[in-house]
Amino acid sequence: MRTATTDVLILRDPRESARKCSLTPLRGRPGIEFVSYHRERRIDASGRILLHPDGEPLSTADRGRGLLLVDCSWRRLENLLATVDGDPPRRSLPALHTAYPRRSRTFEDPAQGLASIEALYAALHRLGADPGDLLEGYRWAEAFLAANPGLAGR
């Protein structure tokens, strides 16, 4: 099994279903750490880059820094970010198409919204790291790569 070479910290909202979570198959992988959100728990993100749609574009200049990925619904993002210390710079991904069938009756997803596993895969690819078999077990992996041909084949 190939693994990504970048250190990844995933701050996960426990309100989200682990059964439906696209990142669940990554638990226990070297270089990937999961931390459950709790409003009283502080998360040290010093030296990391925060994947965020409002950041500057992620580039190879960001290599060598760990990633912070927040796994939650868009409407809860600011609550989870309020527990993050270290002022990680925000970095965004280029325009990509999700394959995940998003449906929300109460909140509009951003046009550039991706499933968490898709965002992590794209970020690692963009940083020049080999995302390897990160999408293994992701139900919509083939459709995601087909919709974003620049991410296929490394």
Image (tube, rainbow, N blue to C red):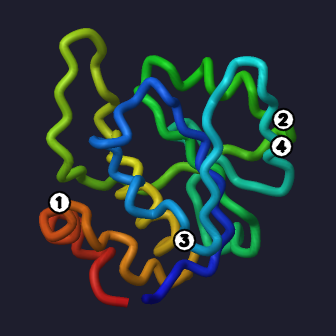
- Residue 117 is situated, as x and y percent measured from the top left of the image, at 38, 56
Mark 1 nearby-residue class (10 Å; few <14, some 14–19, many ≥20): few
Mark 2 or mark 1: which comes first in sequence?
2
Foreground residue among 61 and 44? 44
Between label 3 and label 2, give the one nearer the viewer.
3
Residue annotated with mark 2:
85
Mark 3 or mark 2: which comes first in sequence?
3
Query: Which quadrant holds residue 31?
Result: bottom right
Mark 3 nearby-residue class (10 Å; few <14, some 14–19, many ≥20): few
Badges 3 and 1: C-beta atoms under 8 Å apart? no
Residue annotated with mark 3:
29
Q: CA distance from mark 3 to mark 1?
A: 19 Å
The residue type indicated by label 3 comes to Arg
The residue type indicated by label 4 comes to Asp
Badges 2 and 1: C-beta atoms under 8 Å apart? no
The residue type indicated by label 1 comes to Arg
- Residue 87 is situated, as x and y percent measured from the top left of the image, at 82, 38
Mark 3 or mark 1: which comes first in sequence?
3
Badges 3 and 4: C-beta atoms under 8 Å apart? no
Q: Secondary structure at mark 4?
A: strand
In-image side of 43 versus 9 (left or right): right
